[in-house]
Amino acid sequence: MRSDWQKRATSWIVAAALGLTAVTNAAAQQTAKPGSRAEATRLIADLRRIVTPEGVERAEKVKIGGIEQWVTIRGVDKRNPVLLMLHGGPGFVEMPFSWYFQRGWEDYFTVVQWDQRGAGKTYLLNDPAKLEPTMTRERMVEDTEEMVAWLRREFGKDKIFVLGHSWGSVLGLEFAQRRPQWLHAYIGMGQVTNSPESERRGLQFALDRAQRDGNAEALRELASIEGYAQPGKPPKIEDLYLQRKWLGHYGGAMRSLQGYDTVSAAVALAPEYSDAEIARIWEGNEFSEKRLLIEALQRDYSSVKRLDCPVILFNGRDDYNVSSELAAEWFGRLQAPSKQLVWFERSAHVMFTEEPGKTLVSLVRYARPFAERAGDVAPE
């Protein structure tokens, strides 16, 4: 039999729980669901607001490469190491869905998202006619150098981290070759190594899956691009789209989702973008693709045998969009002061959305110690 004090304690706990439930229910009844995109993005912005005294939360234009370019800079303590993320595409900005995957990074790094030349908000800031002649890989690598130099000055850092994803790994790898002394480490995600061979392997993956599936439509369409990306034969954009259609269908781009529906949904709620900017977000993607993509698909870094900075590779096990198998082969031959290959077993090309927890843990475990050893972290 329970004592009187146990009975009273139980009654108090039940009453407290019921009271809390009543208050919560009342609040829920008074709070209508977001009635517009503006309300939804305002809620997201409030939930992720940086409130620490040493924190940084900036969204601004920076003069890079002779034009205004758009960045966001976020972190709970600006004394932490700076991490610049170079988005994919070309033109596929990752700033507008960074709210979905990035918040945990900001506890350990000052994270910079940058809409590159001809992409996202940077595209909207500039006259496309004036941008067009500058849309070259070489100019984009120079932009990367200028951006890193600006960040080093702005935050008083000797070194930072650069993380290149997909197309961004082209810029990141070339930057790491030029300025290794500016880097704690270079981090490659969906790392481009030998693009023509990657394209051929991606096509073979789609064909193998279609044959196993008995998918007559896929087999017919893929057969129409026989000879795709063979040596000396740059891929046609329409052939690329066909290869990507079936590669994506079989999970070679997003392992857990066929396509990018989740990413698109997150982009639609981007706090950094106005309604008008969201409505035009794919203009920059198309503009950049037309001027950069085919050339990027001919890049071959097989001859890069050494980098003079630490290198970390995040590899999605099922990535056929940019062959992770090929990247691992290249990485095995690479010489560097320090190397770490991290496999993401439940991911394809976009591991930071498919395995966001493991991405965070891996950044903290494998990247941040370089900054810690250099004394470039906030005191605990």
Image (cartoon, grey):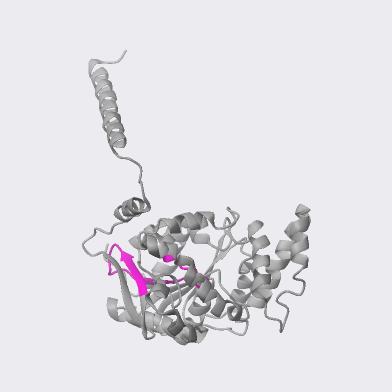
Q: Position of residue 273 (x, y in %)?
A: 37, 63
Is 78 part of what is drawn in magenta? yes
- What residue is shown at x 46% (from left), y 62% (from top)? 362
Q: Quadrant of the C terminus?
A: bottom left
Q: Indicate whether 352 appears above or below 130.
A: above
Q: Nearer the viewer, residue 286 or 14?
A: 286
**Can residue 17 be seen from the camera position used here?**
yes
Q: Residue furthest left?
A: 53
Using the rendered view, name the quadrant where residue 103 is placed. Answer: bottom left
Instruction: Please provide the residue range marked out in magenta.
Output: 70-95
Q: Position of residue 241 (x, y in %)?
A: 64, 67
Q: Residue furthest top?
A: 1
Using the rendered view, name the quadrant where residue 270 is placed. Answer: bottom left
Q: How many marks?
A: 0
Q: Quadrant of the N terminus?
A: top left
- What residue is shown at x 49% (from left), y 79% (from top)? 171
Q: Indicate whether 293 appears above or below 342.
A: below
- What residue is shown at x 76% (from left), y 54% (from top)? 215
Q: Position of residue 224 (x, y in %)?
A: 77, 68
Q: Is residue 249 left or right of residue 3?
A: right
Q: Is residue 242 left or right of residue 216?
A: left
- What residue is shown at x 42% (from left), y 62% (from top)? 278
Q: Nearer the viewer, residue 352 or 240?
A: 240
Q: Nearer the viewer, residue 248 or 158?
A: 248
Q: Position of residue 151 (x, y in %)?
A: 33, 78
Q: Indicate whether 280 appears above or below 168.
A: above
Using the rendered view, name the quadrant where residue 279 is placed. Answer: bottom left
Q: Nearer the viewer, residue 260 or 333?
A: 260
Is 325 part of what is drawn in magenta? no
Q: Is residue 223 left or right of residue 297?
A: right
**Can residue 158 be seen from the camera position used here?**
no
